[in-house]
Each structure stands twice: as C-alpha cells, then as structure tokens.
Amino acid sequence: MCTKQSSVNGQSGPSLACPAPSSIPAPTPSPSAQAMYLQKLQESSEAIKAGNFRRAIQLYTESIGLDPENHILYTNRAAAYLKNSQPEKALEDAIRARSICPKWGKLGSTNCSGSEGRPNTERQQQLKDK
C-alpha cells in the first residue's frame, strides 16, 4: 500500500493517495477546504447508499477537484459510473487510479469486459494511450 502524510487530516500512515512523482510537497489545504472535502465525501457516500449515482459522480468529481491525486476517489467514481451504466468512463477512472497508485489492489479484480464477457484489452490500451 502507498503511504505518505495524508493531505486531509495531517496524520501519517496509510494514505488516500500515493506520493506524487514530484519532490515538491503539496500545499496544505485550509481548514475550510478540508471541511468542504470531508462534507463532499460524506454526501457522496450517502448518494451511493441511496442509489443516486448521478449525484455521487458529481460529488466525487468535485472532490477530485480538491484532491486530484487521490486514487480512491477515482476508484469510487468508477464504481458510481458502472452503477450508472457508463462503463467507458468507469474504465477511464480505473486506469487513472492505477496510474496514480500502481499498487492499489482494489483495481486488481476489475474486469473490464467486452460484450462477450472477455477482457476488452484493446479498449483498455486505447484509453491508456490517450
């Protein structure tokens, strides 16, 4: 698992994001930005539980705007896209999450299948090349 100082709560240990490739440390978010981020996370979880996947996608997108290197947000948004019948966008987010944190195990079981149920490796490669 990737570890670094968490950008949201300032505690060390397992992180929500892998270290950025740059050696320049990310700025510390203001308390109001942290509160907004946490509020969006809570609302997105509630939207998922309520089956409001469109709203969850919107909230995860806003959260990604606040923490664009957070692989978990991309993974969660990918799941919401799948539930909202948007597999192409889900695959894009899964690939983005994996590019941020290659060790992220949750994506290892992701099956991006073609219409015949076989892995759609050609489409995966097209998205990677974008």
Image: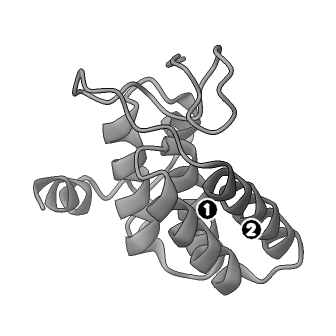
- Residue at position x 63%, y 73% from top? 59
- The answer to whether residue 63 is left or right of residue 32 is left
- Which of the image's four quarters has the C terminus? bottom left
**Residue placed under numbered mark 1 in the picture:** 79
Q: Nearer the viewer, residue 118 or 10?
A: 10
Q: Position of residue 26 (x, y in %)?
A: 38, 35
Q: Is residue 113 visible?
A: no
Q: Nearer the viewer, residue 27 or 47?
A: 27
Q: Quadrant of residue 123?
A: bottom left
Mark drawn on residue 44: 2
Q: Is residue 108 visible?
A: yes
User: What's the distance in space between the residues labelled 2 and 1, CA to CA?
Assistant: 12 Å
- Residue at position x 42%, y 45% from top? 97
When the figure is inspected, residue 35 is found, relative to residue 53, above or below; the finding is above
Q: Position of residue 79 (x, y in %)?
A: 61, 62
- The answer to whether residue 38 is left or right of residue 54 is right
**Residue type (three-letter) at the residue carrying disc 1:** Ala
- The answer to whether residue 50 is left or right of residue 124 is right
Do labels 2 and 1 touch, CB within 8 Å?
A: no
When the figure is inspected, residue 102 is found, relative to residue 71, above or below; the finding is above
Q: Earlier in the sequence, mark 2 or mark 1?
A: 2
Q: Nearer the viewer, residue 83 or 99?
A: 99
Q: Position of residue 31 (x, y in %)?
A: 68, 49
**Residue type (three-letter) at the residue carrying disc 2:** Ser
Q: Nearer the viewer, residue 89 or 59?
A: 59
Q: Position of residue 34 (x, y in %)?
A: 66, 51
